[in-house]
Amino acid sequence: MAANREAAGIGERDEEDLESGGYEKVALALMRAIARDERTTLILNVRNGSTLGVLDADAVIEVPCFVDANGAHPVSVAPLPYHAVGLVTAVKAVEREVLAAVESGSRATAVKAFALHPLVDSVAVARRLVEGYTAEHPGLAWLRS
């Protein structure tokens, strides 16, 4: 999976990440900590719970976690600075619209997801992005108008 993301240019990794073994090494460290009850700290995607108060409990967040035989436990973090609150909540809204587009197959919802992204400056650009992705990736043909 990580190799596919890297080959597609998605989730590009810096040199330090590549040297450390990247996703594969994290997955193995997680399994080792759980199986051997060896407490370690890893950055993982986990259920928010009450870690970030600006997001609902079911939101998936990426934070440092203590890991042991009982699983991953998010480390308490300081409240986000105000500028980060806006970015985090905006990107989470985008993620939810992406999921809604996948669930519904709606091209309009896919456009909305792109349009909500902080780096996309207009609905027209969002439409062009959806058109470009569907043209480049035939597997997205299921998106209907």
Image (cartoon, rainbow, N blue to C red):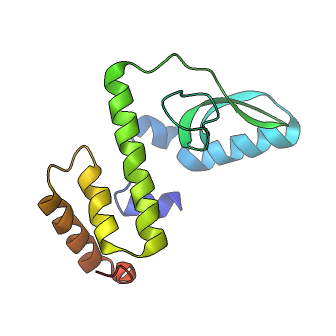
Quadrant that contains the N terminus: bottom right
Q: Position of residue 93 (x, y in %)?
A: 39, 47
Quarter of the image with the C terminus is bottom left
Residue 139 horizontal/vertical position (percent)? 39, 81
Q: Is residue 88 left or right of residue 52?
A: left
Residue at image x 21%, y 73%? 131
Query: Where 94 sits versus 32, above or below?
Result: below
Asked if residue 46 is positioned above or below residue 50 in the image, the reply reads below
Q: Of 109 and 43, which appears nearest the observer?
A: 109
Q: Residue at x 36, y 26 (%)?
A: 84
Expressed as whole percent of the image width and height from the top left, the position of residue 121 reads 15, 49
- Residue 63: image location, x then y, percent: 56, 32
Quadrant of residue 134 within the rendered picture:
bottom left
Does residue 98 appear to the left or right of 53 in the view shown?
left
Tell me if residue 58 can be seen. Answer: yes
20 relative to 81, above or below:
below
Q: Could you tell me which residue is drawn at 37 percent across and 51 percent down?
A: 94
Left/right of residue 32 with respect to residue 29 in the rendered view: right
Q: Nearer the viewer, residue 101 or 74?
A: 101
What residue is at 31 percent from the left and 73 percent from the top? 107
Which quarter of the picture shows residue 39? top right
Tell me which corner region of the image, top left, top right, bottom left or bottom right, holds residue 110: bottom left
Q: Please, which residue is most extreme toward the top here?
A: 78
